[in-house]
């Protein structure tokens, strides 16, 4: 059995909220799966930021 992740309580709470996973599951999640989920989350947020910045550029044009 794997050891619990070595992360701070604040980080665990934030990750559990953003990944929509209970803290208990997060703390015992294998590192490679956690890294995959974090990469997916980062990709979604960067895609959202990119589309948001394009929308902002379009608003300035008449």
Image (cartoon, helix red, strand yellow):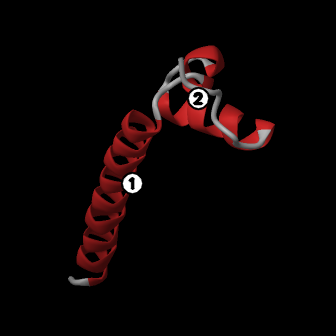
In the picture, which quadrant includes the C terminus?
bottom left
Q: Which is more toward the observer, 14 or 36?
A: 36
- Residue 51 against residue 38 in the figure, above or below: below
Is residue 49 found left or right of 55 in the rendered image?
right
Q: Which is more toward the observer, 28 or 14?
A: 28
**Location of residue 5 in the rendering, given as x and y in whole percent from the top left corner:** 63, 35
**Location of residue 1 in the rendering, given as x and y in whole percent from the top left corner:** 53, 17
Specify the label residue 16 is tagged with: 2
**Location of residue 48 in the rendering, given as x and y in whole percent from the top left corner:** 32, 56
**Location of residue 37 in the rendering, given as x and y in whole percent from the top left corner:** 38, 39
Q: Residue at x 38, y 34 (%)?
A: 33
Task: Check contact, mark 1 vs mark 2: CB within 8 A.
Answer: no
Give the residue pinned by disc 1. Answer: 42
Q: Residue at x 49, y 24 (%)?
A: 20
Find the residue positioned furthest to the front: 1
Q: Which is more toward the observer, 57 or 44?
A: 44
Q: Earlier in the sequence, mark 1 or mark 2?
A: 2
């Amino acid at each position: 059995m794997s050891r619990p992740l070595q992360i701070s309580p604040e980080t665990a709470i934030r990750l559990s909220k953003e990944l929509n996973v209970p803290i208990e599951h997060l703390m015992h999640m294998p590192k490679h799966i956690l890294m995959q989920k974090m990469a997916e989350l980062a990709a979604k947020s960067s895609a959202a930021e990119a589309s948001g910045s394009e929308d902002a550029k379009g608003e300035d044009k008449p």
